Image (tube, helix red, strand yellow):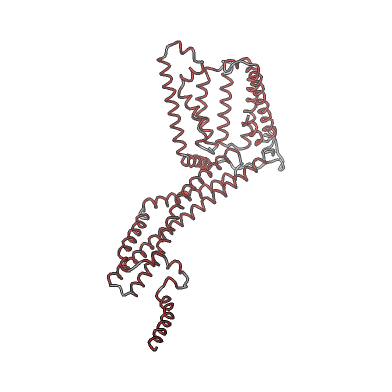
């Protein structure tokens, strides 16, 4: 009976002590601040005889982390790229202040806006590279935190179990390696965070600048119907204080440098598009030369079957390739700066003269060259950005001459258009009315310039 009672008492004591032993011996079940992070399945399954193998696995993971951040030259280059871009954004911001202080015209504003778009595109590419590194470093730090907790628990467990000294030393060495790797990853992560901040600030500056330029565009549209200078007949007369319009500062060499820098930024951003453009030009040129050689070897009778214009295209492959490339590849270079677009048109202008000269009626050739001259004047005026008074005089002379030429073409076109296209009453009538509409627009532009509405004259006359 006594023996039975003793067994019952022992059983009760054992049942009472089991939770206490579990609470003191099972560390992952403690209700501390980070129970879930410590009580991982990996930690609970790690026994003393597995420490060696697990330590080798951890060493391999740490080596992979250190190898990933050992690209010092590549990362330094990324830092240099980001900081150079940040300096470029700062310089572009100062240039934007200077340009917006001048008379706000369409071409300078478009070039400025396109340079900011190109800068933002570059920053977006850098942001992708920096964010990718930031994501990897964050994952590394999370892994290191987990390993630190696991092997700290393992060290406590090994000491509690009375593990041999080499085993304890192996655990301590693993913890030291984790700490050393953590220091390296922390240092790299700090540099990545600095880059993230720099890229973010640069993109914010691009957005702010674009908003300022858009505001300036809206203001420039509102000024179209506002007189910029006094009427031309008061050019040499006396003006009262109320009639005098302040003259904005003339663009300086730094402004032209800003435009050139904007084109350079755009060209670098879309360098692949420019490379593909050159490849397309080479392919077109090669195809035309190949076709011309094939036609040269063909019987003479087959040449007569080709239209004269096609034969002339094959005789001028370089001019044809330039025109086709300029007008077929803009999608490869979206949002081109106005100055770059005008430069490409200047390249296409002599090509168009070479290509169309033989198929133009002799009576239209002088008008064609005069219109080309008008285009050159427009490009020069957009690039040089003369003062409002000089531009007023240039616009009056240019638009008066253009009006005369366009009305002359309107009278000449019905009888001369047959050299270009199939003769038809509809084409003859449409061509005449188009030329007359252009002449009417340039006449309105000349009158607006004479009255002092230079912005309106530029908008109407430039479009015409």
Q: Quadrant of residue 22?
A: bottom left
Left/right of residue 407 with respect to residue 93 in the rendered view: right
Please tell me whether residue 431 is drawn above or below residue 20 in the rendered image: above
Q: Quadrant of residue 376?
A: top right
Q: Residue at x 46, y 69 (%)?
A: 34
Residue 64 picture location, percent across and down = 35, 56
Please tell me whether residue 44 is drawn above or below residue 111 in the rendered image: below
Q: Quadrant location of the C terminus?
A: top right
Q: Residue at x 48, y 24 (%)?
A: 320
Q: Residue at x 43, y 76 (%)?
A: 23
Left/right of residue 367 with respect to residue 293 in the rendered view: right
Please tell me whether residue 459 is drawn above or below residue 43 in the rendered image: above
Residue 421 picture location, percent across and down = 58, 17
Residue at the far bottom: name it.
2
Residue at the far top: name it.
301
The front one of 246 and 103 is 103
Residue at the far front: name it.
1
Q: Residue at x 39, y 84 (%)?
A: 7
The front one of 431 and 131 is 131
Q: Quadrant location of the N terminus?
A: bottom left
């Amino acid at each position: 009976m006594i023996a039975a009672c003793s067994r019952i008492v022992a059983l009760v004591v054992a049942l009472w002590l089991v939770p206490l032993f579990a609470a003191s011996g099972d560390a992952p079940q403690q209700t501390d601040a980070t129970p879930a992070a410590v009580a991982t399945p990996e930690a609970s399954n790690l026994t003393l005889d597995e420490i060696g193998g697990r330590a080798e696995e951890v060493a391999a993971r740490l080596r992979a982390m250190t190898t990933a951040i050992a690209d010092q030259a590549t990362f330094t280059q990324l830092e240099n790229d980001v900081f150079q871009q940040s300096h470029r954004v700062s310089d572009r911001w100062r240039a934007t202040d200077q340009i917006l202080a001048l008379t706000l015209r369409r071409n300078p504003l478009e070039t400025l806006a396109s340079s900011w778009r190109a800068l933002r595109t570059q920053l977006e590419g850098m942001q992708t590279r920096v964010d990718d590194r930031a994501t990897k470093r964050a994952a590394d730090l999370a892994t290191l935190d987990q390993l630190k907790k696991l092997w700290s628990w393992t060290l406590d467990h090994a000491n509690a179990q009375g593990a041999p000294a080499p085993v304890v030393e192996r655990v301590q060495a693993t913890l030291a390696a984790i700490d050393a790797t953590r220091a390296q990853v922390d240092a790299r992560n700090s540099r990545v965070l600095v880059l993230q901040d720099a890229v973010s600030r640069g993109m914010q500056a691009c957005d702010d600048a674009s908003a300022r330029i858009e505001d300036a565009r809206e203001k420039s549209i509102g000024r179209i119907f506002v007189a910029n200078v006094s009427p031309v007949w008061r050019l040499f007369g006396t003006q009262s204080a109320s009639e005098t319009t302040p003259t904005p500062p003339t663009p300086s060499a730094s402004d032209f440098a800003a435009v050139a820098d904007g084109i350079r930024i755009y060209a670098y951003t879309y360098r692949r598009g420019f490379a593909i453009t050159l490849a397309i030009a080479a392919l077109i040129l090669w195809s035309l030369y190949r076709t011309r050689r094939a036609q040269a070897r063909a019987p003479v009778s087959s040449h007569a079957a080709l239209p004269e214009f096609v034969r002339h295209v094959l005789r001028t492959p370089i001019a044809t390739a330039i025109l086709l490339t300029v007008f077929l590849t803009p999608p490869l270079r979206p949002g081109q700066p106005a100055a770059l677009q005008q430069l490409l048109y200047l390249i296409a202008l002599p090509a168009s003269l070479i290509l169309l000269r033989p198929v133009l009626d002799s009576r239209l050739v002088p008008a064609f060259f005069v219109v080309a001259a008008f285009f050159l004047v427009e490009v020069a005026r957009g690039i040089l950005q003369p003062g409002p008074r000089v531009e007023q005089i240039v616009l009056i002379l240019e638009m008066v001459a253009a009006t005369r030429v366009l009305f002359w073409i309107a009278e000449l076109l019905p009888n001369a258009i047959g050299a270009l296209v199939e003769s038809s009453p509809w084409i003859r009538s449409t061509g005449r009315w188009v030329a007359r509409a252009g002449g009417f627009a340039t006449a309105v532009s000349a009158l607006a310039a004479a009255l002092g509405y230079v912005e309106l004259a530029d908008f109407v006359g430039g479009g015409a």
